[in-house]
Amino acid sequence: MLVYLLVLVFSAVHASESEKVFGGRYAKDGEFPFVVSIRGKIICAGSLVTLAKVVTAAHCLNVFQSEQDRDDISGLYVTGGSVNLGKFSGGLEVRTVNSILLTGEYVPRSRFHERIDSHDIGLAMLNSPFDSGRTLQVMNLVSWNATIYKNSWDEIVTKGTICYAMGWGMTVYRLNNFGTDDVAAEPSPILKVIQVMPADNESCSMLFPRKEDMTMYGEICVYSVKNSETICNGDSGGPLVCDGRPYALLNYGPRCGTTFSHQGYLLYWYYLDFLTLSGTHLLPSKWLIFFPLSFLLLLYHA
């Protein structure tokens, strides 16, 4: 699922098998109607904030910010309406991206030995909205009030609620030609779901040096409930769903199939104002906007 895989303390030894499947179950059509697939230079997942706006991990979009890659955003596709990307019927819709928004606080590869990002959240604005229906709907947050949202999440953690992680990411990895490392090989054509359990903030904070602790900005840790079921390359940006509500998006995780290490998510609550941006209004100084058609990266100052 991930662009960046954690190693060292978050890594497992190399798998002895030449191939490993990461478990989980297939989602049912309409079970998570706000979840969309993002494809282009990258494979990620995202969630519909509106029918024309997708929230995902910033590192899924940051690849399009360099001067040479800005024109390639036209090749970025967002697909929704069906859990099966290989089935061109039953509500499947495809949209292209017009512009992307990143927060001004986003810093790539700024933590854990330059392997993971800070404030890893971004928005993709679509050229035209999806058509709303049973299998295509906007995400239903528990609240747009940050305090209510945070209190609801704290209750999820306290109760030990089982949540769901998901994505169309890799389900198999194989050893490379030298037999020295694993290579993600096969993305799932159907949305897959695994069960995870959130950890408390204190446990999550202890995994990083104090200066790299992001729990005060909504970073959380979850652990797989079942052995051999984990997120993997290509699942970044996918939502964490608890009690039927999306609470966070996937930022990073351990090596595929490593269930004893945590998976890092970012709660939406700290970024609720960011999620309401339309891409057409004057932006506060903490947000970045990139319009590919103008070939400019603009930073607005209050």
Image (cartoon, grey):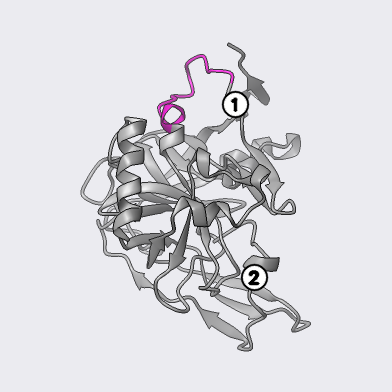
C-alpha span from label 2 to label 1: 33 Å
User: How far across and how far down the image is residue 12, in percent?
Assistant: 63, 75
Residue under circle 2? 11
Q: 10 Å neighbourhood of mark 1: few (<14), some, or many (≥20)?
A: many
The secondary element bearing badge 2 is classed as: loop
Closer-to-camera residue (148/82) = 148
Tell me the amino acid under the disc marked 1: Leu
Which mark is drawn over residue 299?
none
Q: Is residue 63 visible?
A: no
Q: Look at the image and say whether residue 279 sits in the magenta stretch.
A: yes
User: How far across and how far down the image is residue 118, in percent?
Assistant: 62, 42
Tell me the amino acid under the disc marked 2: Ser
What stretch of residues is rendered in magenta?
A: 272-285
Disc on the earlier residue, 2 or 1: 2
Residue located 54% across and 82% down the image? 20
Q: Considering only vertical position in the picture, is 81 above or below 257?
A: above
Mark closer to the observer (2, 1): 2
The secondary element bearing badge 1 is classed as: strand
User: How far across and how far down the image is residue 67, in percent?
Assistant: 74, 34
Indicate the quadrant where residue 63 lies. Answer: top right
Q: Look at the image and say whether residue 31 sits in the magenta stretch.
A: no
User: How far across and how far down the image is residue 240, in percent?
Assistant: 39, 54
Q: 10 Å neighbourhood of mark 2: few (<14), some, or many (≥20)?
A: some
Closer-to-camera residue (208/261) = 208
Q: Considering only vertical position in the picture, is 300 above or below 117?
A: above
Residue under circle 1? 288
For this orientation, the residue located farthest to the top is 302
Closer-to-camera residue (107/149) = 149
Residue located 70% across and 40% down the image? 69
For this orientation, the residue located farthest to the bottom is 17
Indicate the quadrant where residue 29 lies. Answer: bottom left
